[in-house]
Image (cartoon, rainbow, N blue to C red):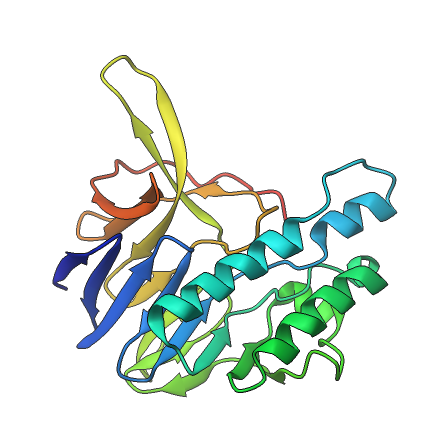
């Protein structure tokens, strides 16, 4: 895998294709004009509020603004959501549906596909007002295989989500920070969680893995020592 930096992005060659890794927490497959997005978890904050937990509003709006920014910067004509589009059935409140539906209407010319994840199976597919084609994975589009959960496939290089990966970086003063990241191994790449209100999990890297963190409004390649994965807040 090779890479180069373009503005705030990193263009990485993966499986012979150019993937542009964006600070908006998405990847752009240049040849297919396709934005790859994992784990939006729309309605998660609403789910917490439905359970009586006072959490901030506006997380869905913030995520959609980043999606718009990624579309504008790349000129993508398609989005593939790699699972967990909606967080839970309890989060399908009218306001969330309205906001996402209006965003979809503004982007009616963009083809959208959802490869269902574990939360989608519990929350149900988005309604007709959101108008996204929904399928079970894997979806094979050579050289890639799109899934929600990490896997190894004989049909191609897997691009997925689910783990909400983060790299733990330690400074000279032993201070540390956990930053969302793109994580590419020999046969699988895991994208960062896109949603505004999602937890993260430390990654367990192999010696030849590549990791790029999202920091200071850009994407940066880093060396990461392996940490045992921690359970994220789903």
Question: Quadrant where the N terminus lies?
Answer: bottom left
- Specify whether 230 is left or right of 47: left
Q: Position of residue 210 (x, y in %)?
A: 22, 52
Q: Nearer the viewer, residue 44 or 98?
A: 98
Q: For residue 192, which quarter of the picture?
A: bottom left
- Specify whether 164 is left or right of 159: right
- Specify whether 85 is left or right of 159: right
Q: For residue 151, which quarter of the picture?
A: bottom left
Q: Nearer the viewer, residue 18 or 151?
A: 18
| Image height of 14 relative to 201, above or below | below
Q: For residue 52, which quarter of the picture?
A: top right
Can residue 101 be seen in the rendering of this structure?
A: yes
- Specify whether 28 is left or right of 126: left
Number of marks: 0
Q: Position of residue 73 (x, y in %)?
A: 35, 66
Q: Residue furthest top?
A: 173
Q: Position of residue 75 (x, y in %)?
A: 37, 76
| Image height of 227 relative to 7, above or below | above
Can residue 191 be seen in the rendering of this structure?
A: no
| Image height of 79 relative to 207, above or below | below
Q: Position of residue 5 (x, y in %)?
A: 17, 55
- x 80%, y 63%: residue: 92
- x 72%, y 65%: residue: 99
- x 44%, y 41%: residue: 229
């Amino acid at each position: 895998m090779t890479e180069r930096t373009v503005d705030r992005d990193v263009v990485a060659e993966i499986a012979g294709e150019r993937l542009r890794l964006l600070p908006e927490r998405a990847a752009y497959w240049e040849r297919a004009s396709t934005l790859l997005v994992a784990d939006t978890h729309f309605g998660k904050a609403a789910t917490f509020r439905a359970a009586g937990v006072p959490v901030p509003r506006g997380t869905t709006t913030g995520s959609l603004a980043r999606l718009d920014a990624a579309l504008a910067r790349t000129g993508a004509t398609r989005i593939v959501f790699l699972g967990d589009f909606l967080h839970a059935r309890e989060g399908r409140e009218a306001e969330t549906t309205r906001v996402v539906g209006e965003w979809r209407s503004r982007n009616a010319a963009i083809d959208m596909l959802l490869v269902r994840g574990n939360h989608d199976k519990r929350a149900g597919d988005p309604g007709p007002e959101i108008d996204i084609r929904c399928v079970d994975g894997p979806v094979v589009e050579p050289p890639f295989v799109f899934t929600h959960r990490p896997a190894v496939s004989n049909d191609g290089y897997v691009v997925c989500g689910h783990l909400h990966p983060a790299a733990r970086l330690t400074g000279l003063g032993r201070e540390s920070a956990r930053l969302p990241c793109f994580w590419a191994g020999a046969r699988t790449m895991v994208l960062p969680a896109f949603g505004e209100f999602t937890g993260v999990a430390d990654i367990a890297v192999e010696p030849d893995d590549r990791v790029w963190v999202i920091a200071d409004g850009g994407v940066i390649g880093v060396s990461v020592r392996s940490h045992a994965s921690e359970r994220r807040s789903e």
